[in-house]
Image: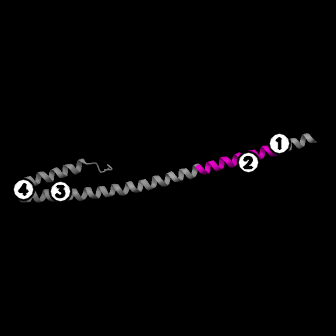
Amino acid sequence: MNFISDIIKDVIKEHYEYISECEIRSTENEKHILKIKEYIMILKANTEISRKYFHQKMNERDYLFNMANEALEKSIEIGNYEMSEVAMSMIKFINEVCPFNWD
């Protein structure tokens, strides 16, 4: 009878160890899930910042291009070729600068 009692005690002990290991793994998984969610939130925030920065840069680029284009048209209209060269240089510069740089 003592033998059966020992087996039952061992089974119960092993069962509780198994449950404890499962809880430990579950807790670790929850920590990993929270860390992943944190990274996702950071990525979303960075994406939004990048999107706003890009739109701001594109708006500035459009504004400068329109100003240079108006200056070019006006210089052609009045026949001022020096002003035309400056306006064309500005247009060239605007087109060469990458809107994706962080400077």
Compared with residue 75, is residue 28 higher up or lower down, i.e. above or below?
above
Q: Residue furthest right?
A: 1
Question: Quarter of the image containing the N terminus?
Answer: top right
Amino acid type at mark 2 = Ile
Amino acid type at mark 4 = Asn
Using residue 102 as the reference point, say whether residue 69 is left or right of it. Answer: left
Compared with residue 7, is residue 33 higher up or lower down, i.e. above or below?
below
Q: Quadrant of residue 71?
A: bottom left
Callout 1 secondary element: helix
The coloring applied to the image is one colour
The tag earlier along the polypeptide, 2 or 1, is 1
Q: Residue furthest left?
A: 79
Badge 4 density bin: few <14, some 14–19, many ≥20, Cα 10 Å? few
The tag earlier along the polypeptide, 2 or 4, is 2
Task: Using the numbered discs, state the Cα–Cα distance from disc 3 to disc 1 in whole angstroms.
Answer: 86 Å
Callout 3 secondary element: helix
Badge 1 density bin: few <14, some 14–19, many ≥20, Cα 10 Å? few
Report the residue marked by disc 4.
80
Q: Quadrant of residue 73?
A: bottom left
Task: Using the numbered discs, state the Cα–Cα distance from disc 2 to disc 3 in whole angstroms.
Answer: 72 Å
Please say if the residues under marks 4 and 1 sit with CB atoms less than 8 Å apart. no
> Which disc number belongs to residue 68?
3
Callout 4 secondary element: loop
Q: Residue furthest front?
A: 103
